Amino acid sequence: AQSVTQLGSHVSVSEGALVLLRCNYSSSVPPYLFWYVQYPNQGLQLLLKYTSAATLVKGINGFEAEFKKSETSFHLTKPSAHMSDAAEYFCAVSGGSQGNLIFGKGTKLSVKP
Amino acid sequence: GAGVSQSPRYKVAKRGQDVALRCDPISGHVSLFWYQQALGQGPEFLTYFQNEAQLDKSGLPSDRFFAERPEGSVSTLKIQRTQQEDSAVYLCASSLGTRAQETQYFGPGTRLLVL
């Protein structure tokens, strides 16, 4: 069975600093991995996804993530945080043959001016 | 084009009432998913439709939960005899095809509060 663990329920960075949100997965088959962002009172928006092509995946808003099979990780990074990046971020793995997503508990990112 | 829409956005129900939550997926999307998101948690899978066929309902928490998608487009999630533990945000998502790596597009959710 697949699962996802997000380390750190709350991360706080200064504007302009590096953003690093951690995600580790467990999967018995090659995984499909996703990062979604959720702004208050909104649905989830896809940032990026890994589908077994390039291990370094670039997404929207300057985010990227690297799939590391040896570490079973898919950490999300952004070189320079912006105030508008403050939101909740969810890592997910595609489980089941039809692709229902299994989400982590989420990491709330705060950006200080 | 329009994204996934859900209605109502907010619903307050008294314990024991029945509620119906609507999802309008992106036109032409074959797959439709329902998720439940409790406060401070990640979304959890409830059920999956491929066109009008409900292929997976393993995540429905009890037989009080029922979902349908009769014409392969709009879907309704119905909760009978609501309980306080049903309070959550209910998210609907759709994807174009049926492959596991497809992007799911989420609606804004329906926030259900059961008093």
Image: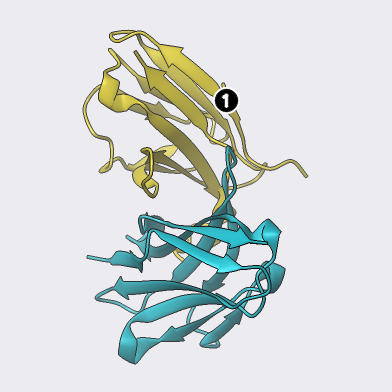
Chain colours: A cyan, B yellow
Is residue B17 visible to us here? Answer: yes
Tell me: B27 left or right of B56.
Answer: right
Say above or below: A88 vs B54.
below
Is residue A98 visible to us here? Answer: no
| Chain to which mark 1 belongs | B
Q: Position of residue B16 (x, y in %)?
A: 28, 8
Q: Quadrant of residue A46?
A: bottom right
Q: Residue at x 68, y 43 (%)?
A: B3
Tell me: A12 left or right of A93.
Answer: right
Quickly name the residue at label 1: B9
Disc 1 marks which amino acid?
Arg
Point out the image quarter for the C terminus of chain A. bottom right
Q: Quadrant of residue B14?
A: top left
Q: Residues within 10 Å of mark 1 (few under 14, many from 20)?
A: some
Query: Farthest residue in the bottom direction?
Result: A70
Query: Farthest residue in the front direction?
Result: A113
Point out the image quarter for the N terminus of chain A. bottom left
Tell me: A100 left or right of B32.
Answer: left
Q: Position of residue A103 (x, y in %)?
A: 38, 57
Say above or below: A47 vs B69.
below
Q: Position of residue B63 (x, y in %)?
A: 22, 25
Q: Residue at x 35, y 26 (%)?
A: B87
The mark total stands at 1
Q: Residue at x 28, y 73 (%)?
A: A27
| Observer-nearest of B49 and A18 | A18
| Observer-nearest of B84 and A84 | A84
Q: Residue at x 65, y 45 (%)?
A: B28
| Observer-nearest of A101 and B74 | A101
Query: Farthest residue in the right direction?
Result: B1
Does dot 1 land on a helix, a strand or a loop?
Answer: loop
